Image: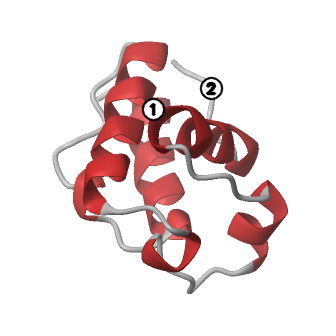
Amino acid sequence: MNEALTFDELASLMKSCAGVAVDPGELESRPTATFEEFGLDSLGLLGVVAALENRHGTPIGPGAESCKTPHEFVALANDRLTSGV
């Protein structure tokens, strides 16, 4: 079983994969804010998904790349990471 994805880790991945600097607290405190509002496009999200899969050794997709909000993404990723599917 893998560790759950945190908003801190997501913010770090957004920075390293797409050059988008965002405060993890902002990601967590704005549950309806979209990735677009934080400056992350679909290509950047694909990079985040790939890096997360490589880091944890667990497939996150399909579907992760179509998440609209960080909250939706974290929930989906954690479901897959903690279930080991």
- The one nearer the camera, 9 or 43, is 43
User: With respect to residue 66, does 61 lie above or below?
Assistant: above
Q: Which quadrant of the structure image shows residue 42? A: bottom left
**What percent of the width, then of the height, locates residue 70?**
53, 64
The amino acid pointed to by label 1 is Leu
Is 42 placed above or below 9 here?
Answer: below
Do tag 2 and tag 1 residues touch (Cβ < 8 Å)? yes
Residue 66 at x, y = what percent? 24, 63
- Secondary structure, mark 1, is helix
Tell me where residue 23 appears, x and y as whole percent.
79, 59
Quadrant containing the C terminus is top left
Residue in the image at 48% along x and 16% along y: 55
Name the residue at 46% across, 67% down: 72
Q: Label 2, label 1: how many angstroms apart (C-alpha)?
A: 7 Å
Residue beneath disc 2 = 3
Q: Residues within 10 Å of mark 1 (few under 14, many from 20)?
A: many
The amino acid type of the residue labelled 2 equals: Glu
Judged from this view, the residue extending furthest toward the right is 25
Question: Which residue was labeled with disc 1?
Answer: 81
